[in-house]
Amino acid sequence: MKYSGIGGQAVIEGIMMKNGDQYATAVRKPDGEIQVQKDTYTSLTEKVKFFSLPFVRGVFSFADSMILGMRTLTFSASFVEDDEDAGEPGRLELFLDKVFGEKLEKVLMGFVMVLSVFLAVGIFMIFPMFLANLLKNVIQSETVMAFLEGVIRILIFIAYIKVVSRMEDIKRTFMYHGAEHKCINCIEHGLELNVENVRNSSKEHKRCGTSFLLIVMLISILCFMIVRVDTIWLKVVSRIVLIPVIAGISYEFLRLAGRSDSPVVNLLSKPGLWMQGLTTKEPDDSMIQVAIAAVEAVFDWKAYLRENFPETRKDLERNKSVDAAAIMG
């Protein structure tokens, strides 16, 4: 495996692929056509030098992924047919439109992002602490309590994924998630980007956001074993304050994993790959076609293969010659 630099995200009936400052969102429209939108996004880590420092960049890279994710989700959602939208706008919608005007969409996106962060912190960081604290009279060891809290956090995350995966739209999104990984794995293992090769590639990838979330939970166990406070309210504060630290450490490991193929790194990446079994599903060929369209809009995979996999380059040139001879014949 050789690092390509491309990454992506599943959206509603489609996939976003990013390479450097360029990103493309490919969506399968209701009529079967693939719509591709290409744009640029400058990372916060590029705008401010301090944000690009190791153990700092992780927090802002996560913020980048949320901002870009909301943009691409909004684009993909615009193709979803909903008969209920045909009615007259409600009073709240009219009021918000009057107050914010053309900025309404950005305001709503910002509100959703902030609300999502608060809910995530509450459900996955604070709530497990309160559950574990119920056993404080039974378990005297702070180390064991921190470990128990971490286990509860992971179990809540698994339960959450299991519940939402029952929704039909989420199932399809997980299938597109698998198509995204398969495309990247296909390229980074030196294979020509076509439906057959992508179909036969792995749907798990070490740089996945699911792996990042699991690493965050595992690192949090170690951090909370070390940082000990006396009162429950100080524990709440510590869980919030240490989030950037935990995210920064987790990002650095994920970044290393994506660029290294060493046995040690691969072994440490296994839990994240296992967790991806919950958030990635096998896609059908139509989804793979969407993923390929997104990749080709921002990434010259043929040039990448020529540079990093000379043997594949020879095969491509040989196949091209055979195809040309067949046409001439």
Image (cartoon, rainbow, N blue to C red):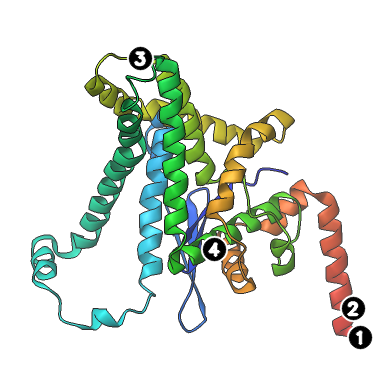
Q: Where in the figure is residue 157, as x and y percent of width and height?
A: 44, 44
**Which residue corresponds to mark 3?**
228
Estimate the spatial distance between the alpha carbons at disc 1 and disc 3, rounded to whole Å: 77 Å
* Labelled pair 2, 3 in contact (Cβ < 8 Å): no
**Which residue corresponds to mark 1?**
329
Q: Label 3 amino acid?
A: Arg
**Which residue corresponds to mark 2?**
325
Between discs 4 and 1, the one toward the N terminus: 4
Disc 1 crowd rating (10 Å Cα; few below 14, some 14-19, many 20+) is: few
Q: Nearer the viewer, mark 4 or mark 3?
A: 3
Measuring 43% from the left and 65% from the top, which residue is drawn there? 167
Q: Label 2 amino acid?
A: Ala
Left or right: 149 in relation to 10: left
Measuring 19% from the left and 60% from the top, which residue is drawn there? 103
**Quadrant (top left/top right/bottom left/bottom right) for the C terminus:** bottom right
Estimate the spatial distance between the alpha carbons at disc 4 and disc 1, rounded to whole Å: 40 Å
**Which residue corresponds to mark 4?**
176
